[in-house]
Image: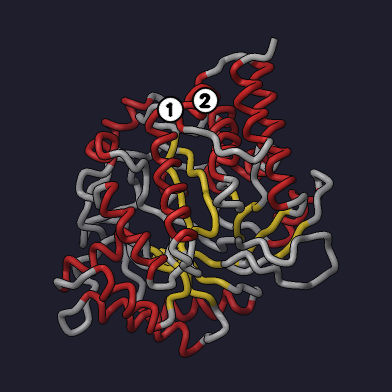
Amino acid sequence: MHSPIDAILGNTLQGNDLTEADGVVLLQTEDAGAIAAIRSAADELRRQQVGDGVTYVINRNINYTNICEQHCSFCAFRRDEGEEGAYWLSEATILEKAADAVQQGATEICMQGGLNPLAKLEGSALAYYVQLVRAILQRFPQLHLHAFSPQEVQFIARADGLRYTDVIEALQVAGVGSMPGTAAEVLDDDVRKILCPEKTTAAEWLEIVGTAHRLGMPTTSTMLSGHIETPEQQMSHLGHLRSLQQTAIQQGYAARISEFILLPFVGQEAPKPLRRRVGRDQPVLADALRLTAVARLFLGNWIVNHQPSWVKLGLDGATEALNWGCNDIGGTLMEEHITSMAGAQGGTCKTADELIAAIRQLGRPAQQRDTLYQPIVQSVVDMPTSLYR
């Protein structure tokens, strides 16, 4: 007799969407055989949807300031102005970092930072951000700028009394190519009241990302997992992401969610109240892998590209995630401050050669890509023509 989990997995492998309730069942089982079957099903679905190739991007993170007006309970990155360790990079320093990235073959700059109330140009927050974008792209027009989360868009809109549409359109005109789907944490307001009470509500985050799609700006998507959230809240979060993507497709928008990235909680340097409540400093790899698999099973028909975080899981953990439904190993980053300041042990930089070696140890072909999952052809590999669907 087949178990309920066998029935759920069989239905999914036939091309049907997992329900949120199905996902909860998969996340709650403690049977080792069932967990192995979940991994196998996610791996098979990944193979059906995107093939065996594993992609990576040569990029650089620029966290331009850690001065932030908000006080998220999980954040070890933020500082107040004048506090020890506070910084705000000058335009010249940012351009130096961009130049170094280009020299190392980067095709993307990923730029995010704290919500710095001082970040204005002639009294306008939007003018500061627009000038930053223009400065980078005037010097390096070949770069794709993947920049400014929904939280930063909301911050700019509030500071200048603008609509989200106004902010996103101005950033597009300046040259921003896509929006990181960060600051999502968990899209449940009961969780957000504890994790990030000053941030956007779940509805506001969804509105900003939906607006970006409508205006032609692609986004990514994320979830911060492994802290105080329940399996039901995890699945509700994935449900919101799937609905966003379905809306973009149904409305015929060219811009959509290009990838899903699971971000397991790192609490080693997090503020003490949340750290005590969670009760551990580093992610539980087994939990992250299972959620990775369930995310593939739930989202894969709509968001085909799935990426682990080598910063949070370490490169070995991220490589193992490629057996649990992931088809991308992320970027070189070159520098990373937000998670490393929280106490992550995965490092802050990987070379392309290191990422390629990790992929090849699984016997799968590696393929460099751009931000929107178009392959950058350097060698002939067995890969789909386009990985962005």
How has the structure been colored for display? secondary structure
Q: Amino acid at mark 1?
A: Pro
Q: Can you see residue 310?
A: no
The circle drawn on residue 348 is none
Distance of mark 1 from mark 2, alpha carbons? 6 Å
Circle 2 sits on which residue? Answer: 27
Q: Position of residue 33 (x, y in %)?
A: 69, 17
Which class describes the residues within 10 Å of circle 1: few (<14), some (14-19), or many (20+)?
A: some
Horizontal and vertical percent for residue 10?
67, 28
Helix or strand or loop: what does disc 2 sit on? helix
Please indicate whether residue 122 sits to the left or right of residue 216 in the image: left
Q: Earlier in the sequence, mark 1 or mark 2?
A: 2
Residue at 25%, 58% in the rendered image: 68
Type of residue at label 2? Leu
Q: Which residue is mark 1?
A: 231
| x and y percentages locating residue 37 in the rendered image | 69, 25
Residue at the farthest bottom position: 138
